[in-house]
């Protein structure tokens, strides 16, 4: 890893040093800044917060937000019941076929995943495309 | 001419920003409010003429040029009339949601002018115990799913001696079909802050957290901003309140997993006892309430517990934002007293099945809730009736399906969801859910494996620590029963 990067992570940690319950906010910010939490980061965080590496890794591996890898593009399609009731499965399949994509990682760097509920159920099917909320996904409006 | 364009997640996901930009360019004064809950009409644009707000909706970015060119005339095909007079708003009893959708959610002066901060002042004047007494009289039960009497929890935390206590708002709202927490946070963030400050005062707690799921970026942004404003304006005088962002784990909505998560650990469910009210965050007495439970506090304090208890039925008192979604015409939330029938909710409020096909089923209370079919539509929407009928009220959602519903697929999905979200602590939930998916695949392929599924469900019901494993049998068994009722 680049030395610059490490400094950046230290900066993030120092920002939260005085805060109780700082592990999750630190991990969120690293994901936000760097797109990924790497092995070296875990070591630095563990040292700073006085935790074991296993404890930090345990948290990173538990939460789907922290397991992310950087992607060129990230599409999450809601498969919750309310969206299923509005045809999300069919719409998703049509969308994927039209765009030459498959579920999971695609060779062009696009990651397509299922997500369970974005709170847009009343105007589903819903999706999240690179952080952008989409209602009526694949619909005709 | 003042024009209101909502800025909540639903409206933004339907293109409200583009609409707002175009209307701004046309030179009108714009206020960004939030949705009033009639989501099927979003994007709902409100134009103030002579003090009355006239609605146009649903407006998409395709309609907007024409609407502007037309000068927002009442003859426009999307004209709805005066918004306050819309039957679906008039039918409601907006106690908790009274401010939602009226104006800009971060305008503190508007909050004050609509009764904001008065409940906190009243709580301080009547004192901590009288505040809790009013909640007791109101009969308020926790809206996060379990329906536990709020006053008992408040009293427990108040009565225990400790140098540190915590107030936590559970805004992890991961149940599909449920969006009223989000709607309240995006519509009245100061209202949530005020309610938590009341709890801090009444229980003697000086620190609070709002645990919001990361899937709600707009609510997170609004609440962070609202907390800063509330501090500056004196709403948070001796109460340190922070937003804590979840990280994509459904099980962290369970209150003890949520505590673990704030403590910086894996979101594993804790065995109870000890209850969080006595030993919660960092082992200290902690009040955990759902957003909607907090949302009921200010109206209870302001109008008295008896006023709140005047709504509802039996032991389900007060109002609840009923959340309608799925294959229903009028998707959205509607704050109504408990006690309406499912039929009334789905047809009179919801407008019936959107696809125009026959009604198939309704799943009530989220992904751990049961499916009900047409012969159940006269059931009353309250905690006891739904429990007796083998289901749950949960967080107040109804997800409607038409007759194309594939019940066996939905039963499989319930197991799949449980397997995906299990925290892994109990074997019946961790392993049983995956076995359930496999067994459902065999049933779908035509094998008679119903007894095996029932066995599995019984094991999960009785061998699980929390409702994720314990309640997954509700959707599974009700869906299978519905399928067999039609096919065997
Ligand atoms: C798997 C699981 C998920 C839950 N998710 C939520 C949730 O998202 N929001 C919530 O308020 N309660 C949720 N609960 C219920 C909480 O454990 C707890 O009962 C609730 O926060 C208490 O607040 P209340 O008394 O105001 O309802 C969940 C429970 C379980 C078992
Ligand atoms: S039932 Fe499932 S989610 Fe709940 S504690 Fe057990 S393993 Fe964890
Ligand atoms: S179920 Fe898809 S947004 Fe809620």
Image (spheres, coloured by chain):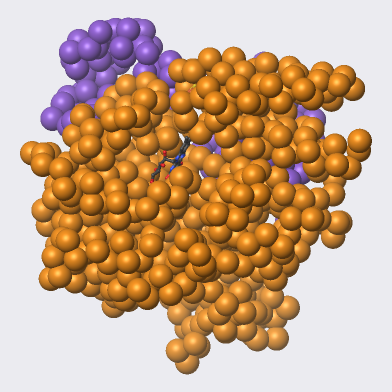
Q: Is A34 rendered above or below residue B217? A: above
The percent coordinates of residue B276 (x first, y second) are 28, 36
The quarter of the rendered structure image containing the C terminus of chain B is top right
Judge left or right: residue B148 versus residue B450: left
User: Could you say which quadrant of the image residue B297 lies in?
Assistant: bottom left
Number of marks drawn: 0
Name the residue nearer the viewer: B70 or B134: B134
Q: Residue at x 73, y 46 (%)?
A: A85
Indicate the colour of chain B. Answer: orange
Q: Is B129 rendered above or below residue A38? A: below
Q: Residue at x 69, y 33 (%)?
A: B476
Name the residue nearer the viewer: B405 or B62: B405
Q: Is B473 rendered above or below residue B228? A: above
Judge left or right: residue B341 versus residue A34: right
The percent coordinates of residue B229 (x first, y second) are 22, 58
Name the residue nearer the viewer: B291 or B203: B203
Q: Is residue A122 visible?
A: no
Q: Is residue B93 visible?
A: yes
Indicate the colour of chain A. Answer: purple
User: Could you say which quadrant of the image residue B367 lies in?
Assistant: top right
The percent coordinates of residue B395 (x first, y second) are 51, 50
Judge left or right: residue B425 versus residue B443: left
Q: Residue at x 46, y 26 (%)?
A: B465
């Amino acid at each position: 890893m680049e030395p610059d990067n490490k400094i950046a992570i230290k900066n993030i940690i120092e920002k939260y040093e005085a805060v109780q319950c700082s592990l999750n906010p630190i991990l969120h910010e690293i994901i936000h800044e760097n797109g990924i939490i790497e092995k070296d980061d875990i070591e630095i965080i563990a040292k700073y917060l006085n935790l074991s590496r296993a404890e930090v890794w345990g948290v990173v591996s538990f939460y789907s937000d922290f397991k992310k890898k950087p992607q060129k593009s990230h599409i999450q399609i809601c498969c919750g019941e309310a969206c299923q009731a509005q045809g999300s499965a069919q719409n998703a399949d049509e969308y994927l076929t039209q765009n030459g994509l498959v579920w999971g990682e695609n060779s062009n760097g696009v990651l397509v995943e299922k997500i369970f509920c974005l709170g847009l159920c009343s105007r589903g099917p819903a999706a999240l495309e690179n952080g952008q909320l989409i209602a009526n996904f694949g619909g005709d409006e | 001419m003042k024009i209101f364009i909502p800025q909540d997640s639903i409206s933004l996901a339907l293109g409200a920003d583009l609409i707002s930009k175009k209307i701004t360019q046309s030179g009108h004064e714009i206020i960004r409010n939030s949705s009033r809950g009639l989501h099927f009409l979003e994007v709902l644009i409100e134009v103030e003429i002579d003090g009355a707000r006239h609605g146009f909706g649903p407006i998409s970015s395709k309609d907007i040029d024409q609407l502007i060119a037309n000068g927002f005339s009442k003859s426009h095909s999307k004209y709805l009339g005066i918004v306050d007079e819309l039957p679906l708003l008039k039918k409601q009893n907006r106690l908790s949601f009274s401010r939602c959708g009226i104006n800009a959610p971060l305008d503190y002066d508007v909050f004050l002018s609509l009764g904001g901060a008065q409940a906190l002042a009243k709580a301080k004047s009547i004192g901590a115990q009288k505040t809790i007494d009013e909640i007791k009289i109101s009969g308020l039960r926790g809206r996060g799913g379990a329906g536990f009497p709020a006053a008992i929890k408040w009293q427990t935390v108040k009565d225990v001696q400790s140098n540190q206590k915590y107030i936590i708002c559970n805004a992890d709202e991961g149940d599909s079909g449920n969006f009223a927490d989000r709607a309240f946070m995006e519509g009245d963030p100061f209202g949530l802050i005020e309610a938590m400050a009341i709890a801090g005062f009444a229980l003697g707690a000086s620190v609070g957290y709002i645990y919001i799921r990361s899937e709600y970026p707009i609510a997170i942004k609004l609440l962070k901003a609202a907390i800063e404003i509330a501090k500056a304006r004196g709403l948070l005088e001796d109460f340190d309140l922070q937003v804590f962002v979840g990280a994509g784990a459904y099980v962290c909505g369970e209150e003890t997993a949520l505590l673990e998560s704030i403590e910086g650990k894996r979101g594993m469910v804790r065995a109870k006892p000890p209850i969080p009210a006595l030993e919660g965050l960092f082992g200290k007495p902690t009040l955990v309430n759902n957003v909607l439970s907090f949302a009921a506090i200010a109206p209870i304090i302001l109008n008295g517990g008896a006023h709140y208890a005047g709504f509802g039925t039996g032991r389900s008192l007060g109002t609840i934002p009923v959340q309608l979604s799925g294959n229903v015409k009028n998707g959205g939330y509607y704050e109504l007293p408990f006690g309406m029938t499912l039929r009334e909710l789905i047809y009179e409020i919801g407008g019936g099945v959107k696809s125009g096909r026959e009604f198939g089923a309704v799943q009530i209370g989220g992904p751990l809730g049961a499916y009900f079919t047409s012969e159940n539509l006269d059931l009353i929407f309250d905690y006891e009736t739904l429990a007796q009928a083998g289901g749950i009220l949960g967080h107040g959602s109804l997800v409607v399906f038409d007759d194309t519903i594939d019940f066996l697929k939905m039963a499989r999905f319930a197991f799949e969801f449980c397997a995906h979200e299990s925290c892994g602590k109990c074997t019946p939930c961790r392993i049983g859910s995956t076995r359930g998916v496999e067994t459902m695949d065999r049933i779908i392929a035509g094998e008679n494996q119903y007894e095996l599924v029932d066995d599995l469900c019984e094991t999960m019901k009785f061998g699980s620590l929390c409702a994720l494993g314990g309640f997954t049998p509700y959707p599974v068994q009700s869906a299978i029963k519905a399928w067999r009722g039609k096919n065997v």
